[in-house]
Image (cartoon, helix red, strand yellow):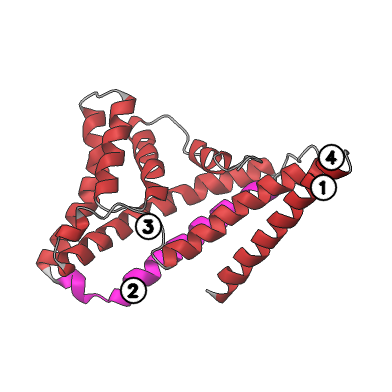
Amino acid sequence: DLVLRWSIGILVVAQAAVVGLQVIGRHVLHQPIPWTEEIARLLLGWLMCVGGIAALGHAQHPRVTALVRLLSEPRRQAVDRGLRLVLLAFFVCLIVPAYDLTVASAAESLPASGISGIWTSAILPAALILMSLVVVQQLYREGIAPWRDRSSLAWSLGTAGAAIASVLIPLLVGAPPLVVLVIGFLVTASLGLPLAFTLALTSATYLLGIGGVSLTILPIKLLGGVDSFVL
């Protein structure tokens, strides 16, 4: 936690400094500094990943809890355990594609700053590994007792199954891709899955379901979503 807090603080300060240089160069000196925009976008990607780890560890990711709050406390905890299983499977499935993207990026360099493209994507597989460890730690802290309770186990596995089935069932019956993703998003969000992962999870499940599509596209989209100087 201490390392994460310091890392987030350093990234925020660095981001402010780099964007400040861009503003000064463009509006005060009337001579933009070319590398500042690239570095600002790179730092934002790193901030997203490092902040995502910290938020996951402290349950700070925004999520919809309107339906989950109607359940009793034991059942709500069981639903959360089921969602952790889904998240763990999702993170593990993306580690290899994210690593492949990092290896492919090593052969490229950013045009303005000249630094290796590996710096833009290496943070993602590291973040996925750390988020997997966070989920494993959370499950370990709860112990094995909840898994021995049949009712709790049924709710946990039922939640995990519902999250995956919300995409696979519409896909198997031939629903249009947009319908599949919307249904998957609504179901997983209503179960209380953090909104940061609902779209990515439904997309990953859809791609696995149709087959023949490389999952590397997901890490590309995840990093590309924040690769914006405007953000």
Type of the residue with mark 3: Leu
Upstream in sequence: badge 1 or badge 3: 1
Would residue 122 be seen by someone viewing this image from the given angle?
no
Type of the residue with mark 2: Tyr
Q: Mark 4 points at which residue?
A: 32
Q: How far apart are marks 1 and 3 (CA)?
A: 44 Å
Q: How far apart are marks 2 and 3 (CA)?
A: 13 Å
Residue at the extreme left = 151
Q: Quadrant of residue 211 in the image? A: top left
Upstream in sequence: badge 2 or badge 3: 3
Upstream in sequence: badge 2 or badge 1: 1
Q: Main secondary structure of the magenta part?
A: helix
Q: Name the residue under label 1.
A: 24
Q: Distance between the residues labelled 4 and 1?
A: 8 Å
Q: Give the range drawn in magenta.
A: 119-148
Type of the residue with mark 1: Ile
